[in-house]
């Protein structure tokens, strides 16, 4: 388990000023920029396409952590890789052959992540561990920011931390959904080392981002 890194989800940013928002959270201490891509089919919301990722790329040199909530996903992986994603995370339900999807991401020279919905078993990672760079535990049902943390995610984080240690590989364990000052400490204690936070990062506007990020990290 590495020291805690914070990945602001730009889903809660001001979409009319996305470039400035990305710059602001970068300067406020974000480690990753978490970009939620939704297709209105895999999840009931529509958000960001590869063109927006490409337009944001010059605004930050931080890791672009692209969370694809789209199905079928394979046809879009290359476009997000070329747009400037550093990590590409997919859901195992988003295509018929998730192993092949992970191979595709790796073949493009990108880091590969797998995201587990609240009802998806931790065992879904077992036959992918040798290729994964990140495991994302959803602590809400994907689709919207501002939802309440599902406590059952903590047991999954603990189980996945054990799997990662047993693998001997360097794999990020990221948690996404309902992370705030109250829920972050339990997620960290369970073994998460990357915290996605949308609502909690962007609360109060740009003047608060640095304080919000250090408070979520547990250093402020
Ligand atoms: C949900 C997204 C999350 C979401 C987190 O589908 O994957 O990244 O934006 O938002 P908060 O931190 O507000 O729960
Ligand atoms: Zn996300």
Image: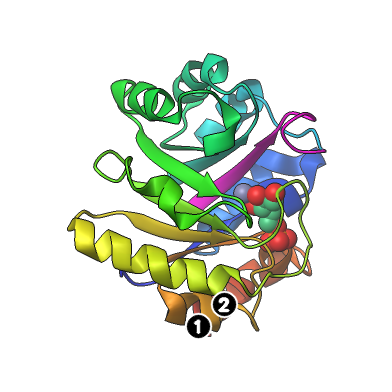
Up the image or down, 102 lies above or below 32; here it is above
Point out residue 46 in the picture as x, y percentages from the top left corner: 79, 33
Point out residue 196 in the picture as x, y percentages from the top left corner: 57, 60
Q: Is residue 53 left or right of residue 193?
A: right
Category of crowding for the residue at label 1, using alpha-carbon neighbours closer than 10 angstroms: few (below 14), some (14–19), many (at least 20):
few
Q: Is residue 151 magenta?
A: no
Point out residue 213 in the picture as x, y percentages from the top left corner: 57, 71
Residue 9 appears in the figure: no
In the image shown, does 216 or 142 lie closer to the viewer? 142
The residues colored magenta run 32-44
Q: Is residue 111 left or right of residue 143?
A: left
**SS class of the residue under badge 2?**
helix
Q: Which residue is mark 2?
A: 184
In the image shown, does 82 or 208 lie closer to the viewer? 82
For the residues labelled 1 and 2, say whether their Cβ atoms are less than 8 Å apart.
yes
Residue 80 appears in the figure: yes
The residue lying at 59 percent from left, 30 percent from top is: 94
**SS class of the residue under badge 1?**
loop
Q: Which residue is mark 1?
A: 218
Category of crowding for the residue at label 2, using alpha-carbon neighbours closer than 10 angstroms: few (below 14), some (14–19), many (at least 20):
many
In the image shown, does 201 or 46 lie closer to the viewer? 46
The residue lying at 57 percent from left, 76 percent from top is: 216
Q: Which part of the image, by quadrant, shows the N terminus?
A: bottom left
Up the image or down, 9 lies above or below 188; here it is above
Q: Which residue is most to the top?
A: 75
- The alpha-carbon separation of the residues under discs 1 and 2 comes to 8 Å
């Amino acid at each position: 388990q590495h020291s805690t890194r914070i990945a602001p989800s730009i889903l809660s940013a001001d979409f009319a000023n996305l470039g400035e928002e990305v710059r602001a959270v970068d300067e406020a201490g974000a480690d990753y920029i978490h970009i939620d891509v939704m297709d209105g089919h895999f999840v009931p919301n529509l958000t960001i396409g590869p063109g927006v990722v490409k337009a944001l790329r010059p605004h930050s040199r931080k890791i672009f952590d692209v969370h694809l909530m789209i199905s079928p996903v394979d046809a879009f992986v290359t476009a997000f890789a070329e747009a400037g994603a550093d990590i590409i995370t997919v859901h195992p339900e988003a295509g018929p052959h998730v192993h092949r999807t992970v191979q595709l991401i790796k073949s493009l020279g990108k880091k590969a992540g797998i995201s587990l919905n609240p009802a998806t078993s931790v065992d879904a990672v077992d036959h992918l561990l040798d290729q994964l760079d990140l495991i994302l535990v959803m602590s809400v049902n994907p689709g919207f920011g501002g939802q309440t943390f599902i406590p059952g995610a903590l047991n999954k984080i603990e189980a996945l931390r054990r799997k990662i240690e047993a693998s001997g590989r360097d794999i990020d364990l990221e948690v996404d959904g309902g992370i705030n000052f109250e829920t972050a400490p339990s997620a960290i204690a369970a073994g998460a080392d990357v915290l996605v936070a949308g609502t909690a990062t962007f609360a109060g506007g740009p003047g608060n981002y640095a304080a919000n990020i250090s408070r979520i990290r547990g250093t402020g």
